[in-house]
Amino acid sequence: MPRHPVRSSASPGEMRTSKPLPAPDLSLVEACFRIASEARVPLILENVYGLERFIGPPVSRYGPFSLWGDGVPFMLPQTRRAVLKMKHRSPILRAQIPVELASSVAAFHTPIAEMQLSTPRS
């Protein structure tokens, strides 16, 4: 179980660990899968690599982006690894989904969505 790192007061720069971290609250992740299932729509969940310890391996990875769900395209765009490195210090900029990935997902799902819209649901 992961532990909180804490700076030791005994010697500067030395780290010790405190209490084990509590298990993360996965209710939001579970709600995403439940809502997608109830709505009968594909799901793509992008989250940190560490989520793998709690819900299993991702369906795919695109650089540092881990993707779960039944809506992940089987072929993702090819790009240089250097382009996908997290260069920004700002968490807002690091959280942005690359345009190439977003475009690939949209191109994959657009024909499927159009077909579903034209077919009456039972």
Image (cartoon, rainbow, N blue to C red):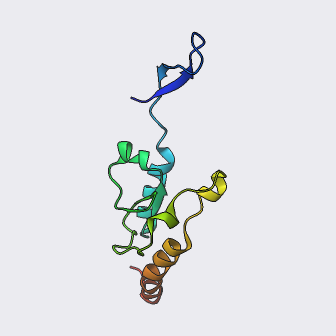
Count of marks overlaid on the render: 0
> Which quadrant of the figure contains the N terminus?
top left
Residue at x 32% of width, y 52% of height: 57
Residue at x 37% of width, y 47% of height: 52
Residue 92 against residue 72 in the figure, above or below: above
Residue 101 against residue 54 in the figure, above or below: below
Residue at x 55% of width, y 68% of height: 98
Q: Residue furthest top?
A: 10
Q: Residue 74: x, y in percent?
A: 33, 73
> Which quadrant of the figure contains the C terminus?
bottom left
Question: In front: 93, or 83?
Answer: 83
Q: Residue 18: x, y in percent?
A: 50, 18
Residue at x 55% of width, y 22% of height: 6
Question: In front: 116, or 89?
Answer: 89
Q: Residue furthest bottom?
A: 118
Residue 44 against residue 91 in the figure, above or below: below
Taking 57 as reference, is 85 left or right?
A: right
Q: Residue 31: x, y in percent?
A: 48, 52
Question: In front: 81, or 34?
Answer: 81
Q: Residue 64: x, y in percent?
A: 46, 57
